[in-house]
Amino acid sequence: MILSYATEPRTWDVIVAGGGTAGAIAGIAAARAGARVLVVEALGSLGGTGTNAWVTPLMRNVSAGQNLNRGLTDELKARLRARGDGATDQSGNDNWFNPEGLKVVLENMLLEAGGEVLYHTHVVAPVLDGEWIKALVLHNKGGLRAFRAAVFIDATGDADVAVRAGAPFQEGDADGLHQAMSLRFTLAGVDTGRLCAFLNGHGQPQASPNFLHFWMVWGRGSSLEPLFREAVAAGVLEERDGDYFQGFSVPGRPGEISFNCPRIRADLNDGANPWHLSAAQTDGRAAIDRLTAFCRRSLPGCEAAYIGTVAPMVGVRETRRIVGEYTLTLEDILDCRRFEDAICRNHYPVDIHSVKGGARLLHERDGSAPYFAPDAYHEIPYRALVPLGLRNVLVPGRAASSTFEAQSAIRVQQNCHTMGEAAGLAAAWAARDCGGDVRAVDVAALQVQMRRLGGNV
């Protein structure tokens, strides 16, 4: 129970809790729709997974060779390219970006739209009146203070607001285990030309030193596996360091490689558990030291490399998922289900980074279900963003209503952008026209507006 707090004298139409992948875009969309918007963010920049967790590049989400996520995602990419922080490779993949540039672009887009942001501020608890949230009690250097709005967007990634307001939720798989977490890092001082030549001659062909992508997973046929085995035998790496290893170039940062690893210890898998989250930082940093030593020892071009960045935020793939008006399922994905209230299209695969080990379900895009056709896609309904038991709350992003398997397909950044854009528009309209009730939004009109703004729904 909160003993005492002050009330902020100002009010907003929409408050977005969490300025991450979905939340930043939601705030921009709502502000552009004319709403008075406040985005509340625990760290010091917008972008969440894409910036503070350093998850780069964006994972491709295409059908028949065309991007499925458009609208604000297209504008974001264009702005990144214009400042040299985004790039398109020879295959037409336009998803390469620099996380530091993304911070600037998102902040500029929000402020230009008239939105406000409050950094270094944490959600403490909602103030409830039945099924309505009247305010969020926040904590920052000013102490505890209640901030009021007509509509709230829970973009915390962990459904913190909805869960604390009593909304039902699910988490983990059938055994209660979550997907593996990672702590991403970069190596700077890399001779990418030499590294590219080595990879080309070592079973991992590269198109250019500017667009490197290399990987190793035990037992998956990577040409780098013998080098990992040698490093384990020499005591440079631990066995688990080879569970997942992946490196990418970063636009605007020559000589630097971003790593989608290390994978955090299997027993630390709940990103909504503060003890797991804290221990993941220390476990990850120790593993980063080992992987840095391996790269210097075994990968030509990395002999003089040094740690450029360690992400300040652990990469969390899945924690709590709301139970919404509709729960997206694996069957919906395999059957390419369409919905009358669709707000996002997806063809990213079911991609489970299991702490149990073993293959990742459906990741190879191989099978006989409708989903596996090259021009296939399924849709995400607006109802999956609407939590049961709450009237003026939307939950876009990785905490949207879905099963464990389905969540692993819709959680990637570009889908979070599109869900955030839909939530921002809907929240602005609910505040303006519906007394804050997100269920009263005209979703057909929302779809029309998203298409008018360049969306693909």
Image: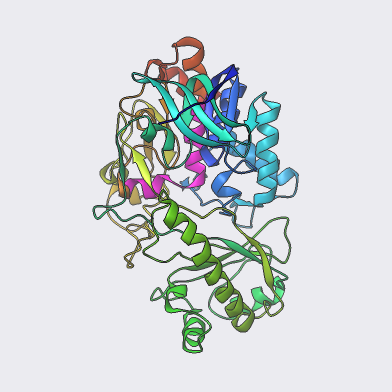
Residue at the limit of the structure toward the front, as seen here: 3
Identify the magenta region: 405-424
Query: In this view, which residue lies farthest toward the right?
Result: 83
* In magenta segment, residue 419: yes
Q: Is residue 133 left or right of residue 140?
A: left
Pinpoint residue 362: horizontal percent, then vertical percent: 33, 57
Please report the residue visible at 34 percent of the width from the left and 25 percent of the height from the top: 340
Percent x, y of residue 314: 52, 55
**Most foreground residue, 33 or 283:** 283
Q: Residue at x 31, y 56 (%)?
A: 177
12 in relation to 422, above or below = above
Residue 354 to residue 192: above or below: above
Quarter holding the N terminus is top left
Magenta span dominant secondary structure: helix
In the image, 388 versus 119, the foreground residue is: 119
**Is 154 on the left or on the right of 310, as rendered?**
left
Question: To which quarter of the image does residue 312 belong?
Answer: bottom right
Asked whether, in this view, residue 256 is left or right of residue 316, the answer is right
Q: Would you say 173 lies left or right of 386 here?
A: left
Where residue 424 appears, as percent x and y from the top left, is: 52, 26
Q: How many numbered markers are drawn? A: 0
**Quarter of the figure that contains the C terminus:** top left
- Nearest the viewer among 35 and 405 is 35
Any magenta on residue 407?
Answer: yes
The colour scheme is rainbow
Q: Could you tell me residue 118's position as x and y percent? A: 63, 32
Res 351 seen here: yes
Asked whether residue 451 appears in the rendered view, the answer is no
